[in-house]
Amino acid sequence: MNETIEAQYQAEVKQADLDHHKPTAGAMTGHIVANMWYLDVKYHQILWFVKGPQTLALQHLYQALIAQNRAQIDELGAVLLDENQLPPSTVDEYTRYTKIEEEPRLKYESADTMIDTTAHDLTFANLFIDRAIKLAQREERPAMAAYLTKLRGANNRNIRQLQALLGKTAWEGLVEEDDDDDDD
């Protein structure tokens, strides 16, 4: 192996370790890319195994989610590169950096459970997006913050539409709302 390549890779590993111990916008965005990669797998699992009267409509929905997610992965990878950051690019990195849980039994669940799982996964993914937005703003990376904000909006739209399929409002059962609305 070329010594220069090995030195570059070792520098990358060292920097990634530093960035993940004291999170940076780039490191947090790397988690987002890994989460999206895992969501792609889950979306395919649902596309291939959903059953019931909604099957055709849900397959169409999940094909759209897959297409959107793949475009977002590519766009977010480009944003990272534009910011002189390295997106995860190996299965090992995706696996180490994801926080989305894989569930092989999901393929046997009802369509409603599959939809609900997707809404919960996107809500969970938003936690990382929100953190990355704050870090990008703090690090004065406005282009990264802007793209992440757009990504958050797309997730919110998808969550609302998934929740509607379940007869719920956008955040019902996903986000704890503050009942303390008193101005006392």
Image (cartoon, rainbow, N blue to C red):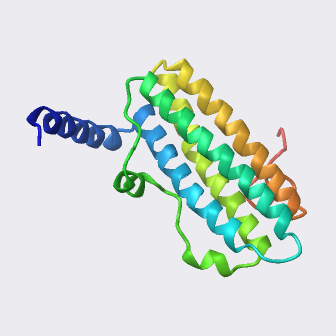
The percent coordinates of residue 148 (x first, y second) are 60, 32
Identity of the residue drawn at 42% across and 33% down: 26
Identity of the residue drawn at 42% across and 27% down: 81
The percent coordinates of residue 120 (x first, y second) are 68, 60
Rendered position, 77 above or below 163: above
Q: Is residue 175 visible?
A: no
In the picture, the quarter occupied by the N terminus is top left
Q: Is residue 178 left or right of residue 43?
A: right
Instruction: Quadrant for residue 41, please give it.
Output: bottom right
Instruction: Quadrant for residue 114, please give it.
Output: bottom right
Identity of the residue drawn at 82% across and 40% down: 184
Task: Please state the total of marks drawn on the protein image.
Answer: 0
The residue lying furthest to the front in this view is: 1
Along the line of sight, which residue is nearer the eye, 145 or 114?
A: 114
Q: Is residue 98 visible?
A: yes
Q: Is residue 157 left or right of residue 155?
A: right
Along the line of sight, which residue is nearer the eye, 97 or 107?
A: 107
Along the line of sight, which residue is nearer the eye, 105 or 132?
A: 105
Rendered position, 105 above or below 177: below
Along the line of sight, which residue is nearer the eye, 130 or 164?
A: 164
Rendered position, 58 above or below 179: below
Rendered position, 104 above or below 131: below
The residue lying furthest to the left in this view is: 3
The percent coordinates of residue 150 (x first, y second) are 67, 31
The percent coordinates of residue 117 (x first, y second) are 68, 65
